[in-house]
Image (tube, rainbow, N blue to C red):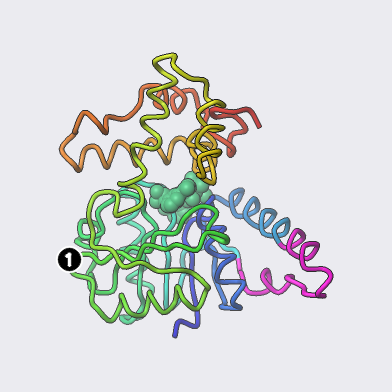
Amino acid sequence: MITTACVCGSGTMGTGIAIAFGLKKIPTILFDTNPDNLEKARDYIKKYIDKQNVKFGDSKQNFDFILDNISFTPDINRCKAELIIEAIVENESVKTDLYKKLEALNDDSSIIASNTSSLSISALQESLSRPENFAGLHFFNPAQIMKLVEVIKGNKTSDKVITILKETCEIINKQPVICIDSPGFIVNRVARPYYLEAMSLVEKGLCRIDEVDKVLESAGFKMGPFKLMDLIGLDINYNVSCLVWEQLGKPDRLKPSKLQQEKVNKGELGIKTKKGFYQY
Ligand SMILES: NC(=O)c1ccc[n+]([C@@H]2O[C@H](COP(=O)([O-])OP(=O)(O)OC[C@H]3O[C@@H](n4cnc5c(N)ncnc54)[C@H](O)[C@@H]3O)[C@@H](O)[C@H]2O)c1
């Protein structure tokens, strides 16, 4: 069983993943090169704890312990743990630079897992001197709530590492699904048309954004595609669309949306910038 964790990247995903480990009282280091983002993560976790304390106040449950189990640092030398989960910017060379530093700092048995949405685990693995200890661990947003985690086996990932990751997911109350490495894994591949067709309807002037969301939510989807893209981050979602499209040989049906590209160029990235398809 994993007894120490480190999460690299304290943005949307890293913060939620750290909460998931903190909830199980697993000592977790949260590392980010940007101290402001570490402070934002601390504030977000405090707010999450306050909400949980109110929600479960009647049963006198107190969630303050979560913060006791998370330490925040901008110092990479503190990134030593049995399991290190990388949730930094979706850029292959930035990620592989980090892995090299993490491998040098950690024991041979440490596992490094990437939360990448769209980069190939087998390709990322090539940069490592211990590729058998590397896999994908793809959480969904918000990571402290969403149950599903895709556990992705690269060409060189050992079976033992996959077993440890699956067990770790179960310990933190997640539902692991083991996937073979392929473009977009399972969820992001299947979900592409959900976003792209919705944007195509709006681009062609056939529907309004709020109408598409309303109709799909009424049909049973938990969130309409535009609300969901605003939650994920339009930059992240657009990047996934581009990478999946390229990796599958640029099929017309999965061509990334111009509407989304324009929003990204304008810096309208969704909830995190207070403007995306909606205003916040
Ligand atoms: N946003 C989503 O819904 C979502 C869902 C699943 C997976 N992902 C994946 O998770 C990863 C992170 O996404 P996010 O939405 O949390 O991004 P984000 O932009 O919210 O956060 C990324 C964080 O990484 C930090 N960072 C950048 N380079 C770093 C480095 N070299 N070392 C340490 N920290 C560094 C940044 O300062 C930032 O705080 C990406 O690979 C993304 O594809 C995102």
Q: How far across and how far down the image is residue 158, in percent?
A: 23, 76
Q: Residue at x 77, y 74 (%)?
A: 61
Q: How far across and how far down the image is residue 183, in percent?
A: 24, 49
Q: How far across and how far down the image is residue 64, in percent?
A: 74, 70
Residue closest to the far top: 205
Q: Is residue 91 left or right of residue 208?
A: left
Quarter placement of the N terminus: bottom left
Q: How far across and how far down the image is residue 32, in percent?
A: 51, 56
Q: Is residue 71 left or right of residue 93?
A: right
Q: Residues within 10 Å of mark 1 (few under 14, many from 20)?
A: some
Of 7 and 176, which appears nearest the observer? 176
Quarter placement of the C terminus: top right
Q: The residue tagged with tag 1: helix, strand or loop?
A: loop
Circle 1 residue: 155
Of 34 and 64, which appears nearest the observer? 64
Q: Residue at x 50, y 33 (%)?
A: 226
| Residue 87 position by quadrant | bottom left
Of 215 and 21, which appears nearest the observer? 215
Note whether 90 is above or below 51 in the view shown.
above
Q: Which residues are magenta?
A: 49-71
Of 167 and 213, which appears nearest the observer? 213
Q: Residue at x 54, y 64 (%)?
A: 30
Q: Amino acid at mark 1?
A: Asn
The total number of labels drawn is 1
Residue 52 colored magenta? yes
- Secondary structure character of the magenta stretch overall: helix
Q: Is residue 212 left or right of residue 113?
A: right
Note whether 55 is above or below 197 in the view shown.
below
